[in-house]
Amino acid sequence: MAEVLVYVDHVDGAVRKPTLELLTLARRIGEPVALALGNGAAETAAVLAEHGAVKVLTADAPEFADYLVVPKVDALQAAYTAVSPAAVLVPSSAEGKEIAARLAVRIKSGIITDAVDLEAGDEGPVATQAAFAASYSTKSRITTGTPVITVKPNSAAVEAAPAAGTVEALSVSFSEQATGTKVVARTPREATGRPELTEAAIVVSGGRGVNGAENFHIIEALADSLGAAVGASRAAVDAGWYPHSNQVGQTGKSVSPQLYIASGISGAIQHRAGMQTSKTIVAINKDAEAPIFDLVDYGVVGDLFDVVPALTEEVKTRKG
Amino acid sequence: MSLRIVVTVKYVPDATGDRHFADDLTVDRDDVDGLLSELDEYAVEQALQIADEADDAEITVLTVGPEDAKDALRKALSMGADKAVHVEDDDLHGSDIIGTSLVLAKAIEKAGYDLVISGMASTDGTAGVIPALLAERLGVPQVTLLSEVKVEDGVVTGRRDGDSASEQLEASLPAVVSVTDQSGEARYPSFKGIMAAKKKPVESWDLSDLDLEADQVGLEGAFTTVDSATERPARTAGTIVKDEGEGGKQLAEFLAGQKFI
Ligand SMILES: Cc1cc2nc3c(=O)[nH]c(=O)nc-3n(C[C@H](O)[C@H](O)[C@H](O)COP(=O)(O)OP(=O)(O)OC[C@H]3O[C@@H](n4cnc5c(N)ncnc54)[C@H](O)[C@@H]3O)c2cc1C
Ligand SMILES: Cc1cc2nc3c(=O)[nH]c(=O)nc-3n(C[C@H](O)[C@H](O)[C@H](O)COP(=O)(O)OP(=O)(O)OC[C@H]3O[C@@H](n4cnc5c(N)ncnc54)[C@H](O)[C@@H]3O)c2cc1C
């Protein structure tokens, strides 16, 4: 069976969920071989094996942390050469897309970015993309070279499928470009204790209607009652009420949770671009004409300062 | 010594319009007005600020696109860029990421550069990979997705806010930079700027000017193909209630019914 190279996104050995989704999708087109780089790479093997990786290639070197992107491209290319895979799958993070694209040019292949689904086809893997703020769904293929495809989080339900997961060290020689962009300092993002925004099953977002940083605790309280991640519109972020890392939309994160709750958000096209593929959409807005109501499964026309705390109380009571 | 800055700008269909695919499954450009991709305005803005700080700098704005893409160049010129290059050729129609990055890289080399500045992503294709590909093809450092950027003594520094960390980056020129919408509001063209833009030079290059063949670009040269594009069915109208004191409770009832609580 053909092998499919899967690039692993992990933090110090803790594999992030989108990679497990990739392994699930990879099994539709072949046998996954995973590539894990950097600190803790070898520690990813157990969970990757549980999810279908027949082999786990690992490499660690200071270059991966000290320089931007290119050392990882060099490693992915080394893995590509070693495996000769039928396809290369990479999580659609900002960095993942850059790594994948540079590999594609090097191996003279086409690239598809931000797939939301993947199937085997007669002429190679077929990727589904959501276009124009998810108002269109397209199916595309790569016609030249080995398909390189990046896949968005929440594109598949994670399925366990135990496999060998044999660990092998990959030897990587770095290109001249590898040390071109130095990472001079790195400040890790503070943990909030809440789920990762792009991976969360439920996202609760606040917009301009929240009217101040001091009011965002209302949104956070609802999120915590549901075990949800907190999102924000660009208006709320630009006003300095919430960090940019929580922005949902075209220039923020794109989320695709089971449930998205928008409070005090009008539903501008750029916001919709980041949340329109959510399974169930709920909005609370005092303006009955707000465009967000065109998207919702359930909407409440009302003041969020009344509705959100009442909902939070009710959720807490029901959860007992 | 003069600092040569090339800013890549894309002409895109207005996102607030009703965007469609044409019969050949490329973007329908006739149906919706086009404009300078808003995210490239941030690239022009940073170029202007970097040029202001430099002793001597020249900003060239570059687009690959159909005839109307001149509008995007005019906008960038009216913001303050010095000159423009328009790569236009019928054979470019339907170029994919690989093809577009090839044409842009060739044009940047021909124009001459010390610094390339791009937007973080276009507002139509939204791949966000062209800047990294330009660095790959030009063989220079990529310093991408910056929310803060500075150029001093031939060195570019900037802050990249990633998923798990915020990184401070540094590279020597020549380099390719891309900037996010956090990098600072883009200025509005002044009346003077708009008038001045009309006199600024716009060069037109075709494939032969770039030593490229038709089969390397466009639909013919594409490494990818779109098999189908379907409009998502409109969501079925949801339930909308007016809060008359019970809105929170009713919503909880709905969420419980959907097994979220
Ligand atoms: C290139 C580009 C990229 C962009 N990227 C993004 C992006 O990634 N994400 C994003 O979100 N936006 C993005 N935007 C901005 C976007 O166009 C909108 O400006 C933004 O989404 C508006 O945020 P909002 O809905 O919070 O604010 P508004 O549009 O001002 O809406 C506020 C809403 O709150 C309601 N409201 C007010 N008070 C209350 C109350 N007490 N109770 C209930 N409801 C209340 C109002 O009725 C209104 O509908 C982008 C724009 C551009 C040009
Ligand atoms: C919905 C949709 C999905 C697509 N998916 C794919 C795909 O999966 N694979 C594929 O190969 N092609 C794809 N394409 C085609 C691709 O968008 C075009 O080739 C495009 O010109 C380059 O990619 P981008 O617009 O996504 O650019 P991005 O990488 O998002 O652009 C980043 C920056 O590069 C610069 N730039 C990009 N294009 C130009 C230009 N023409 N002129 C000047 N500067 C420019 C700008 O500074 C821009 O801010 C897709 C197109 C659409 C409309």
Image: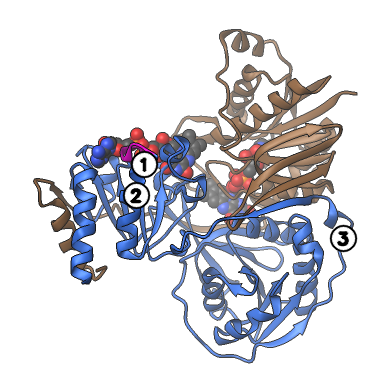
Measure how far apart labels 2 and 1 are at the Cα level. Answer: 7 Å
Say which label, 1 or 3, has the lower sequence index: 3
List the residue tagged with mark 1.
A214
Q: Secondary structure at mark 2?
A: helix
Label 2 crowd (10 A; few <14 / some 14-19 / many >=20): few
Inspect the image, locate mark 2, and give the three-letter code of the amino acid beneath it.
His
Colour that chain A carries in the picture = blue
**Circle 2/circle 1 CB separation < 8 Å:** yes
List the residue tagged with mark 3.
A175
Q: Quadrant of the C terminus of chain A?
A: bottom left
The magenta span reads: A207-212
Inspect the image, locate mark 1, and give the three-letter code of the amino acid beneath it.
Glu
Q: Secondary structure at mark 1?
A: helix
Say which label, 2 or 3, has the lower sequence index: 3
**What's the chain of the residue with tag 2?**
A
Q: Which callout, 1 or 3, points to the residue nearer the camera?
A: 1
**What's the chain of the residue with tag 1?**
A
Q: Residue at x 59, y 30 (%)?
A: B41
List the residue tagged with mark 2.
A217
Q: Residue at x 39, y 62 (%)?
A: A257
Inspect the image, locate mark 3, and give the three-letter code of the amino acid beneath it.
Ser
Q: Which chain is brown?
A: B
